[in-house]
């Protein structure tokens, strides 16, 4: 069998865990894929990318059964995230309050709500719960205990109960992570990426532009979560480096797309220019976003947010996770909101043409995978 060679660039979301976590996740999901298909899939160890360890990490994947070789390159920006990752709860409360004030002034929430209601709820519930849950956990026991204890003693115990329990409950509801996400992206919208992140995006673009001259049957730029935001700026620079055109073997994938978080900020003019430039560019884009994922914008074409038409060949798809998971493994409901946002990178209990390993390590091209997925009833 003639070898099928694929180059994958992966740009992840707002997550400080970095390459070790994502390499291990890929290995685990490749093992699940192999168990479901019977195909022999192996994943190598990590090594530094050609532009240096600060820019990317690489590993090779081989699907010997299907005759597929994959060079997988993880584009690194977790060091940038780590510098703005707010750990102190008081600092997080103050900074997120300022960030939400900025969102209130500049975000087009009316238009966002018309696009999808779920993400609006996801954006707005963290500050509400961050106030109500600690308050109620302090107030309820204090009022009950005040029937038998002095008011000051009841208040102290109520505050202690709140301090002990509220952090765990808020974490379970993904409140701190969402507050950090909205705080960072408020600053990103207003101020732009900044010199350090822009330099990193330039390095990513140079890596992708150079790889497009390689002997690959398919080149994928896979963006996930907040990576779908930066991926638009990145792709604009790749296209510029390539003289305005991309080869037919290139495809951009958006998984759990969140572009409107920046694109619907009225003050994010730098980002509007990126999207307008991409709207005029011909390339292949496949968006895979799940309607039950409250953090993603299903069926929202990012280019139409700023332009009346677009030149790309676009597919907007739901992964329909419920068809591929047993009910007890399906990440539904509020308590699983964070996990549901990572199901794009997993393999379910049954194989989907659009699961992450099928797309990156399977024999089908992305176009063939989309066609196969559309035949599933």
Image (cartoon, rainbow, N blue to C red):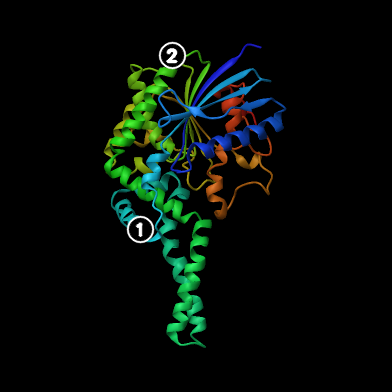
Q: Is residue 51 rendered to the left or right of residue 253? A: left
Q: Which comes sooner in the sequence, label 1 or label 2?
A: 1
Neighbour tally class for label 2: few under 14, some 14-19, many 20 plus, Cα within 10 Å: few
Q: Nearer the viewer, residue 95 or 61?
A: 61
Distance between the alpha carbons at the discs numbered 1 and 2: 47 Å
Q: Residue at x 33, y 55 (%)?
A: 95
Can residue 239 be seen? yes
| Quadrant (top left/top right/bottom left/bottom right) for the N terminus | top right
Q: Is residue 321 rendered to the left or right of residue 255? A: right
Q: Position of residue 245 (x, y in %)?
A: 38, 17
Q: Nearer the viewer, residue 244 or 310?
A: 244
What number is the disc on residue 82? none
* Location of mark 2 (residue): 213
SS at mark 1 in the image: helix
User: Could you say which quadrant of the image residue 97 lies in?
Assistant: bottom left
Q: Is residue 326 rendered to the left or right of residue 368? A: right
* Location of mark 1 (residue): 91
Q: Residue at x 29, y 39 (%)?
A: 192
Q: Position of residue 146 (x, y in %)?
A: 48, 85
| Quadrant (top left/top right/bottom left/bottom right) for the C terminus | top right
User: Could you say which quadrant of the image residue 351 lies in?
Assistant: top right
Question: Which is closer to the viewer, label 1 or label 2?
Answer: 1
Q: Residue at x 39, y 52 (%)?
A: 86
């Amino acid at each position: 069998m003639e070898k099928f060679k694929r180059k994958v660039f992966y740009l992840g979301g707002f997550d400080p865990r970095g390459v070790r976590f994502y390499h291990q996740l890929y290995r685990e999901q490749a093992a699940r894929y192999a168990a479901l298909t019977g195909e022999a899939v192996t994943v190598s160890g990590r090594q530094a990318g050609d532009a240096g360890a600060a820019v990317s990490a690489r590993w090779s994947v081989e699907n010997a059964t299907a005759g597929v070789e994959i060079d997988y390159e993880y584009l690194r920006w977790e060091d940038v995230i780590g510098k703005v990752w707010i750990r102190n709860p008081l600092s997080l409360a103050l900074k997120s309050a300022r960030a939400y004030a900025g969102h209130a002034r500049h975000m087009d929430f009316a238009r966002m709500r018309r696009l999808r209601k779920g993400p609006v709820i996801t954006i707005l519930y963290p500050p509400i719960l961050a106030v109500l849950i600690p308050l109620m956990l302090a107030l309820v026991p204090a009022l009950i205990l005040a029937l038998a204890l002095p008011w000051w003693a009841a208040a102290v115990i109520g505050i202690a109960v709140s301090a002990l329990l509220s952090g765990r409950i808020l974490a379970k509801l993904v409140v701190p992570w969402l507050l950090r996400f909205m705080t960072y992206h408020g600053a990103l919208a207003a101020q732009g990426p900044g010199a350090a992140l822009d330099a990193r995006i330039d390095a990513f673009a140079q890596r992708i532009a150079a790889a497009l001259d390689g002997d690959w049957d398919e080149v994928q730029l896979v963006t996930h979560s907040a990576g779908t935001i930066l991926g638009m700026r990145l792709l604009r620079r790749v296209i510029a480096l390539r003289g305005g055109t991309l080869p037919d073997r290139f495809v951009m994938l958006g998984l759990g797309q969140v572009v409107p978080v920046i694109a619907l900020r009225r003050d994010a003019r730098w980002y509007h220019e990126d999207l307008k430039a991409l709207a005029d560019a011909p390339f292949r884009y496949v968006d895979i976003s799940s309607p039950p994922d409250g953090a993603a914008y299903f069926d929202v074409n990012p280019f139409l947010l700023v332009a009346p038409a677009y030149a790309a060949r676009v597919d907007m798809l739901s992964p329909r996770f419920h068809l591929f998971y047993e009910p007890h493994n399906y990440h539904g409901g509020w308590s699983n909101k964070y996990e549901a946002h990572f199901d794009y990178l997993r393999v379910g209990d049954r194989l989907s043409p659009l699961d992450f390993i099928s797309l990156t390590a399977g024999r089908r091209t992305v176009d063939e995978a989309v066609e196969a997925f559309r035949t599933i009833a």
